[in-house]
Structure formats: C-alpha cells, structure tokens
C-alpha cells in the first residue's frame, strides 16, 4: 500500500517548491515510483518537476458530467477512467496527475466518487503518493482520497505563517478523512520559530501546538530556480534547502514512521 503524503500551505509560502523537493527526495532515497498529484488550482507542480501536464482531471470530470461518455459504446465509468489515464503524465521515476480548477455549479458527487475509486485503485502501483494541495485543501475536503498518512503544512517562519499553519491544522481536523499525522515544515527559516496568538480564543499559541517536522533554511539558489522557471532537478545536490528536506523525510520515514513499508 502506498504511503500518502499531502502538502498544504497558503500561496507564497513556497509550498509547491517544497512539494517538488519532497518528490525528488523520495525518488533519490526510496527509489520510487511516486504518483505526484497536483491538487492546487494554480497547477504549478508540473513546472517544478519539469513535465507538461497531458491533461487535467477537471476537464475530464466536466466533460463526463455535461456531455456523457464520448464513445457511445463505453459506459460513464470506463469513459471517466480512460480520460484520467490519458491525463496522467509520465516523468523520470514519477507520474503526474493534475486536478485543475475547483468544481463549478452542479452536483459532482458521482464524479468525485469515481475519482476516489480510481485513485484508490491506482495508488497501490506506487510506493508514495504526494498530493500538493491549496491552503483550503479542496480536493481532500471533497474526499477524493480517503486516507492520508502524513499531512505537511508548509509555512513561513513568521507570526502570520504560524497563524496560517494553525488554521490549516484545525481545518484538517474537521475533514471527513483519516489523517494519521500532521506537522509543520517551516520554510525559509532564518531565526527562532514564531510565537503567535490564536485569534479564535485569544490564548497564547506557539509552534509547539503543532508538531514540527523540520525547518528548511532560506536558499537563494532554490529561490532563484523558482523565479527563473527552473525545475527541482536543476538544484545542486548540496542545496541547503534540498538537503534539509531530505533530512526531514529521512527522519520521518525511517526513524519514526513507516519503517515496515519502506527502507531509505
């Protein structure tokens, strides 16, 4: 069974860059294969991984809902699965599935049930499934995947970042899915971790309220790569940010969790 890792965080936190580093780290340490799911409507994960999405699930889903199966000889389930298979993009050691824009008006229950069923059947073919979500975690909240082993909240090491991390943490607790473990990856950390106040109950809250998986230091090379449209594979092996991500997942996957399933 695949280990499912979901990444969430607000826009501008470096979430997608960290997600891409996590995928590269898993490929190099565990050997893959990895299913990368881009569940952020901005759909930038493919760019960071150096692949152009062959299609997006949203288009497949809406086509099925609006027009029915494209081939009269195929039922809706087969047509939907065929469309998603066509949308899967092959990379070096990983596959990319891009979700696309959020749901529009109308009922998507049947389509989401088909999508969840397809992902459940697809996941065992991979060692890891890495899902890059937006801050609201739309696709997780729609239950397109029932179980998450690890939810990584990427946040800037600032007071605002800590507040955002707490809000995502509370949202995750309310989702109708099973999340085994939740923690924060403090990105572009340049000093002490932040101390902030929870605006909902005005009680003092610190980074200790949410488990810290680790800190990723500010790395000019990683920042420049993101700004210049380079891929995560363009980063040097000694990139401080990439080395930090590798260490975080070495500790998570080997020292503490999932040791029976994976050897890194």
Image: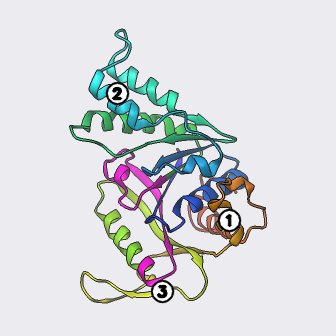
Q: Nearer the viewer, mark 3 or mark 1?
A: 1
Disc 2 crowd rating (10 Å Cα; few below 14, some 14-19, many 20+) is some
Quarter location, residue 72? top left
Q: Is mark 2 on a helix, strand or loop?
A: helix
User: Which residue is nearer to you in this view: 46 or 113?
Assistant: 46
- Separation (CA) of disc 3 from disc 2: 46 Å
Q: In this view, does 101 lie above or below 159?
A: above
The residue that disc 3 covers is 194
Tell me the magenta residue range.
Answer: 132-161
Q: Where is residue 153 in the image (x, y as percent from the top left)?
A: 47, 67
Comparing labels 3 and 2, the label whose residue is closer to the camera: 2
What is the C-alpha distance between the residues marked 3 and 1? Answer: 25 Å
90 sits left or right of 74 in the view: right
Residue 120 as seen in the image, left or right of residue 233: left
Q: In the displayed structure, would residue 5 be above or below residue 242?
A: above
Task: Give the residue at x 39% y 26%.
Answer: 80
Looking at the image, which residue is at 55% across and 50% down?
Answer: 45
Residue at the image position 47 percent from the left and 70 percent from the top: 183
**Secondary-structure class at tag 3:** loop
The answer to which quarter of the image holds residue 71 is top left
Label located before the other in sequence (2 or 1): 2
Label 1 neighbour load within 10 Å: few <14, some 14-19, many 20+: few
Q: Helix, strand, or loop for circle 1?
A: helix
Give residue 63's mark.
2
Q: Residue at x 74, y 55 (%)?
A: 234
Name the residue that disc number 1 marks.
224
Nearest to the eye among marks 2 and 1: give it: 1
Q: Which of 230 and 153 is in front in this view?
A: 230
């Amino acid at each position: 069974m695949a280990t499912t890792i979901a990444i969430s965080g607000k826009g501008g936190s470096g979430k997608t860059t960290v997600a891409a580093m996590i995928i590269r780290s898993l490929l190099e340490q565990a050997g893959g294969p990895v299913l990368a799911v881009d569940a952020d409507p901005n759909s930038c994960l493919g760019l960071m991984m150096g692949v152009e999405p062959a299609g997006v699930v949203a288009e497949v889903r809406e086509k099925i809902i609006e027009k029915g199966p494209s081939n009269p000889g195929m039922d809706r389930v087969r047509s939907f699965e065929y469309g998603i298979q066509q949308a899967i993009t092959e990379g070096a050691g990983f596959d990319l599935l891009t979700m696309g824009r959020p749901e529009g008006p109308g009922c998507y229950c049947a389509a989401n049930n088909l999508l969840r069923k397809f992902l459940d059947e697809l996941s065992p073919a991979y060692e890891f499934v890495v899902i890059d979500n937006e801050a609201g975690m739309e696709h997780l909240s729609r239950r397109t995947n029932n179980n998450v082993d690890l939810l990584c909240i990427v946040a800037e090491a600032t007071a605002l970042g800590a507040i955002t991390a707490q809000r995502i943490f509370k949202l995750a607790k309310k989702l109708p899915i099973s999340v085994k473990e939740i923690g924060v990856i403090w990105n572009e950390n340049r000093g002490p971790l932040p101390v902030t106040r929870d605006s909902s109950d005005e009680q003092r809250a610190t980074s200790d309220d949410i488990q810290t998986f680790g800190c990723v230091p500010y790395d000019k090379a990683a920042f420049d790569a993101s700004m210049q449209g380079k891929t995560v594979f363009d980063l040097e092996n000694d990139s401080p940010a990439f080395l930090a991500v590798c260490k975080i997942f070495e500790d998570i996957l080997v020292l503490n969790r999932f040791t029976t399933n994976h050897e890194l």
